[in-house]
Amino acid sequence: MSTNRKDDILHVAAELFARQGYHATTVADIARAAGIAQGTVYLYFGSKKEVFSALVDQTLALFHDVLIESRRLRHVKRSASLPSKCLRYTAERCDFSMTTAPSLV
């Protein structure tokens, strides 16, 4: 685990939600995959819903950054490839890969 435990929990939770689905994933699953005690998850998040909400907030922030970056890049014109460029940019920032979360890439 890295030095930022909260980010580690979010990363592991994103992988589990992608692989198992939200409803099938428990806080115990997240803790086990992160290599921490279940209570440690609750030090950072009050519930599984709060973990998911933090992931949504994180994703929205990434999309905001993508939009700002696309405005900055004057050479990017309206094209059919812009959505795929945005998704690729976001996927790179989220550190998702085809093996980790193929349904998200």
Image: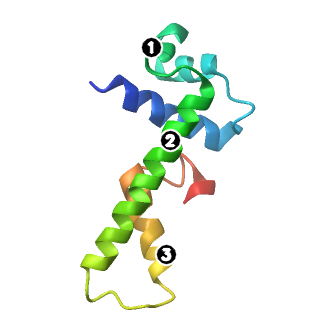
Residue that carries the numbered disc 1 in the rendered image: 43
| Visible residue check, residue 1 | no
Q: Where residue 21 sits in the image (x, y, percent)?
A: 70, 39
Which label sits in the foreground, 3 or 1? Answer: 1
Amino acid found under the numbered disc labelled 2: Leu
Q: Are marks 2 and 1 in contact (CB under 8 Å)?
A: no
Q: Quadrant of the N terminus?
A: top left
Q: Where residue 14 sits in the image (x, y, percent)?
A: 54, 39
Residue found at x 33% / y 86%? 76
In the picture shown, does residue 65 fall above or below 18?
Answer: below
Residue that carries the numbered disc 2 in the rendered image: 55
Q: Quadrant of residue 19?
A: top right
Q: Residues within 10 Å of mark 3 (few under 14, many from 20)?
A: few
The label shown at residue 84 is 3
- Quick one: SS at disc 1? helix
- Quick one: SS at disc 3? helix
Label 3 vs 1, first from the N-terminus: 1
Q: Where residue 41 sits in the image (x, y, percent)?
A: 49, 17
Q: Is residue 26 left or right of residue 45?
A: right
Label 2 vs 1, first from the N-terminus: 1
Amino acid found under the numbered disc labelled 3: Ser
